[in-house]
């Protein structure tokens, strides 16, 4: 069994029971104690589990838990890169696009160099900085005002008012979580309102969310599954998630190679 397959089994068990023990996984998977510990280390680096003495527990917390940008920026790096590459392929030259705040959209911003004549609207200082640093003279970057959140989003009435006057060809929406009843969610009420304004401005709404976001629920629903046009995730998305999502939304899965995971 490949490392990715073992880690999927471990994640499924944690999602089912909330925690796993190394000794139980050794027996179940027929591998060494050190192999299981390496798998747990890999999952912890990706922000999918929390390591504890003798095993690991779920990372799913309260609906208002809001990790900072720095904490999120080191999680699921390979998945975000793969998603960003696939998302960039959806963008045509000469269009106006929106990028909400978040580490996945920030990664996408660094993949836009080959697309000319873009106008990019964002509520993220990080995203705006990433775009400006590329030095393109054929790109307009519009940064909304607003109050900054722990995840470095600019939110609130100023941001909402500016977005409601815009019409964007394509909006890429980063989310905190996705679940069948809740839809696409955020742990910040003001960010939820701002992101809904982005969604309303979109000719086409594309959600970019790695597989770790499945079954995570924030306090505020941004949009339901059916209100988005496309979800771009990675091939680690569980089978039940693929079924639930594909019934309501177009789904594209970016392939994450074993080499990318190890890197």
Image (cartoon, rainbow, N blue to C red):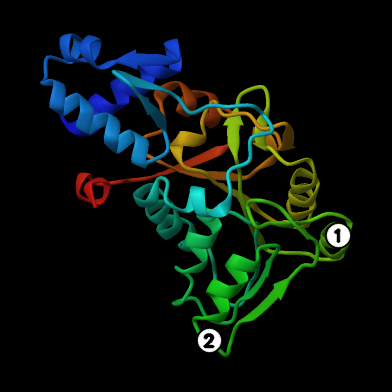
In the image shown, does 196 or 203 lie closer to the viewer?
Answer: 196
Contact, mark 1 vs mark 2 (Cβ under 8 Å): no
Picture residue at 34% right of the left edge, 50% below the top: 78
Q: Residue 93 appears at what percent x and percent y? A: 55, 75
Position of 60 relative to 175 (above/below): above
Q: Residue 260 appears at what percent x and percent y? A: 25, 51
- Name the residue beneath numbered marker 1: 164
Q: CA distance from mark 1 to mark 2?
A: 27 Å
Q: Residue 92 appears at what percent x and percent y? A: 54, 70
- Residue 199 image label: none
Mark 1 and mark 2 lie on one chain; the one further toward the N terminus is 2
Q: Which corner quadrant of the image does residue 84 belong to?
A: bottom left
At mark 1, the secondary structure is loop
- Name the residue beneath numbered marker 2: 136
Position of 234 relative to 126 (above/below): above
In the image shown, does 7 or 65 lie closer to the viewer?
Answer: 65
Side (left or right) of 70 relative to 62:
left
Picture residue at 31% right of the left edge, 21% below the top: 10
């Amino acid at each position: 069994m490949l490392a990715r397959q073992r880690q999927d089994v471990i994640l499924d068990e944690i999602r089912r029971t909330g925690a796993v023990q190394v000794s139980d996984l050794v027996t179940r998977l027929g591998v060494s104690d050190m192999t299981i510990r390496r798998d747990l280390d890999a999952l912890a680096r990706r922000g999918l589990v929390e390591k504890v003495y003798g095993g690991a527990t779920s990372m799913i917390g309260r609906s208002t838990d809001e990790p900072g940008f720095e904490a999120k920026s080191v999680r699921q790096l390979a998945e975000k890169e793969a998603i960003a590459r696939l998302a960039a392929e959806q963008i045509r030259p000469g269009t106006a696009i929106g990028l909400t705040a978040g580490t996945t959209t920030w990664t996408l911003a660094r993949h836009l160099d080959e697309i000319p004549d873009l106008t990019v609207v964002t509520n993220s200082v990080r995203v705006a900085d990433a775009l400006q640093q590329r030095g393109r003279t054929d790109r307009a970057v519009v940064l909304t005002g607003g109050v900054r959140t722990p995840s470095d989003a600019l939110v609130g009435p100023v941001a909402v008012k500016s977005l409601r006057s815009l019409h964007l060809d394509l909006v890429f929406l980063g989310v905190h979580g996705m679940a069948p009843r809740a839809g696409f969610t955020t742990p910040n009420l003001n960010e939820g309102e701002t992101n809904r304004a982005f969604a309303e401005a979109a000719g086409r709404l594309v959600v970019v969310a790695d597989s770790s976001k499945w079954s995570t629920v924030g306090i505020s629903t941004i949009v339901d599954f059916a209100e988005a046009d496309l979800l771009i995730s990675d091939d680690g998305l569980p089978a039940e998630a693929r079924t639930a999502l594909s019934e309501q939304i177009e789904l594209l899965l970016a392939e994450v190679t074993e080499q990318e995971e190890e890197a």
